[in-house]
Image (cartoon, rainbow, N blue to C red):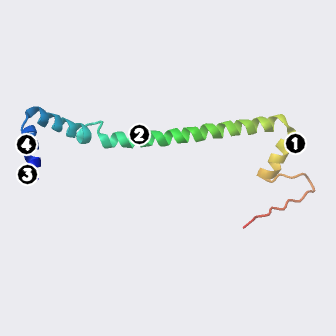
Amino acid sequence: MRSFWKFIWPYLRNKYVITLVAFTVWISFFSQYNLTDRLQLSRTYKDMQREKEYYLDQIQRDSARLHELTTDDGNLEKFAREQYYMKKPKEDIFVVVEE
């Protein structure tokens, strides 16, 4: 341990090394754009990119479904019956719930 301090001590007495260490500590922990905030912002950015991909995929699927519903009346009727339980007059609907 003594040899370690003998090796390090001359560098720690150098004013440029002290300034560099102080600057590095200041930038890493105390400045407006410190290291912890940068890491958190990077993580948030990645999460938002994943959400963006999800919503773009959802928009594409919904657009395809909307095109399918607007071009074919049979699909529109099927959708209305399945999603909104619509029925024709004198027709009964049975909803089966699986547990």
- Which badge, 4 or 1, comes first in the chain's sequence? 4
Question: Which sits earlier in the primary sequence, circle 4 or circle 3?
Answer: 3
User: Which numbered marker is on residue 45?
Assistant: none
As shown in the figure, which amino acid type bears the numbered disc 4? Trp
- Number of the front mark, 2 or 4: 4
Q: Quadrant of residue 59?
A: top right
Considering every residue shown, the one lying at the far front of the view is 3
Q: Secondary structure at mark 1?
A: helix
Do the CB atoms of the residues marked 2 and 3 lie less than 8 Å apart?
Answer: no
* Residue in the image at 28% along x and 36% along y: 32
Q: Amino acid at mark 1?
A: Gly
Q: Say which element carries label 3.
A: helix
Q: Earlier in the sequence, mark 2 or mark 1?
A: 2
Q: Which residue is mark 3?
A: 2
What residue sits right under mark 4 in the picture? 9
Label 2, label 4: how far apart the Cα atoms are: 37 Å
Q: Label 2 is placed on what type of residue?
A: Ser
Residue toward you, 12 or 74: 12
Residue on which disc 1 sits? 74
Task: Tell me residue 41's x, y (percent).
Answer: 39, 40
Observer-nearest residue: 82 or 43?
43
- Residue type at tag 3: Arg
Residue 1: x percent and y percent?
11, 53
Q: Helix, strand or loop at disc 4?
A: helix
- 89 or 50, which lies in front? 50
Residue 98 position in % (x across, y down): 75, 65
Question: Which of the pair 16/35 is nearer the observer?
Answer: 16
Determine which residue is flagged by label 2.
42
Mark 4 surroundings within 10 Å by alpha-carbon count, few (fewer than 14), some (14 through 19), many (20 or more): few
The image quarter containing residue 94 is: bottom right
Q: Which residue reaches farthest top? A: 16
Q: CA distance from mark 3 to mark 1?
A: 87 Å
